[in-house]
Amino acid sequence: MILRRNLSHPSVPSLRSMITSYAILMIYQRMMSACTFADLLSANGDWDIGKLSTTFTAEAISHIISVKSPDPNDTEDVIIWRWSKRHNFEVSSAYSHIFASPWDDKDQIWDLIWKNMVPQRVCLFLWLTCRQRLMTNSERCRRGLGTSAVCPRCHMADESVLHTLRDCVELKAAWMQLLAPGMREVFFQLDLHSWLRCNLSSHVALPGDDIPWRILFASLLWQLWKNQNDLVFNNLSAPTKSLVNKSLALARYYNEPLKQSSSLVHRVEQNHVWPRPPKCWVTKIIWTPRDANKLADRLAKCVNSHLFDVLTLDEPPDYLQPILAADISALHS
């Protein structure tokens, strides 16, 4: 909705809030008791800086002149509906506005994102990337949360989504290590939406490896974004070669379940079903807070959802020793 601003409306900031000292406040009160806003205007109807400077500070004057000066022809503030020609609310206009959104739930790219064989957190990251909702410096400035849109890595361009994931001169080397010579020119020319669609729909495997490009592409994007956050929040940045090697290792790991046969999955599901207890048993499902069962929580974090193997531990791993020691200490205290 749009409001036609009028200085008499309560939503307009009071000039009293701009007074910075008690002495000036007294002058303001005496002055305003004997004059009106019209007395602070010049002959052509604009704010008179000379008259304002006798009463208000320079900071207050900068706020005052940013507000439209009073006009005798101004009308009272009214609420209007911007999405109809008569400015009156109509259900039909609201319905049309809602469904006029550029969001296309039939677009194939959403399937390419959510059905990619990468962890859900990476899929969510890809979705935010496609929607251009990553909190880059450009996005922070757009939301009024930042003052500079410049890339914190190269300081040569605004940090847009494409810049921080592809076009930054310090990150191009990562892509150049993986791209075939014939792909490089097109790769760096596509817009964001076309770039994501083209790479996430690719079924080509990496030369000399069996990793699908769509998985490796998503893996490297995720590592580049995490590395950018490390630079911003921790002032740390991994070498390009390290990012590429880690992305390759993770992509192989993500791709492993695709190579598992359906018979193996079926066998694992059949052999590890919890048997139904005898009728004499009383089964209770009790929720336990995470902090009250840190041992199980730590074990759960070590299991990857893509693996179908059953892990058997003959001895407690090293990372469980501090938790077990804390539990034993609590029992004896």
Image (cartoon, rainbow, N blue to C red):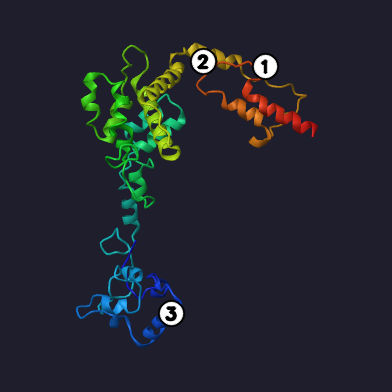
Closer to us: 261 or 181: 181
Taking the image as drawn, is residue 289 in sight? no
- Dot 2 or dot 3: first in sequence order is 3
Secondary-structure class at tag 3: helix
Q: Are marks 2 and 3 in contact (CB under 8 Å)?
A: no
Which residue type carries mark 3? Ala
CA gap between label 1 and label 3 equals: 78 Å
Q: Nearer the viewer, residue 318 or 284?
A: 318
Quarter of the image with the C terminus is top right
Looking at the rendered image, the disc whose residue lies closer to the viewer, 1 or 2, is 1
Q: For this rendering, which residue is in front, 154 or 76?
A: 154
Kindly identify which numbered label has been placed on residue 265.
Answer: 2
Q: Looking at the image, is 228 positioned above or below residue 83?
A: above
Task: Determine which quarter of the picture holds residue 38.
Answer: bottom left
> Where does the image place residue 262, in percent across and percent down from the top left?
47, 14
Q: Amino acid at mark 1?
A: Glu
| Residue 312 position (above or below residue 232) | above
Question: Few, some or many C-alpha atoms within 10 Å of disc 1 (few <14, some 14-19, many ≥20)?
Answer: few
In the image: residue 291, left or right of residue 63: right
Picture residue at 40% right of the left edge, 71% below the top: 18
Q: Which residue is mark 1?
A: 315
Percent of width and height locating residue 157: 27, 41
| Residue at disc 1, secondary structure | loop
Identify the residue at image location x=35%, y=73%: 57
The quarter of the picture where the N terminus appears is bottom left
Front-lying residue, 5 or 142: 142
- Kindly indicate the quadrant of the structure image that contains residue 54: bottom left
Q: CA distance from mark 1 to mark 2?
A: 27 Å
Residue lying farthest left? 44
What kind of residue is marked 2?
A: Val
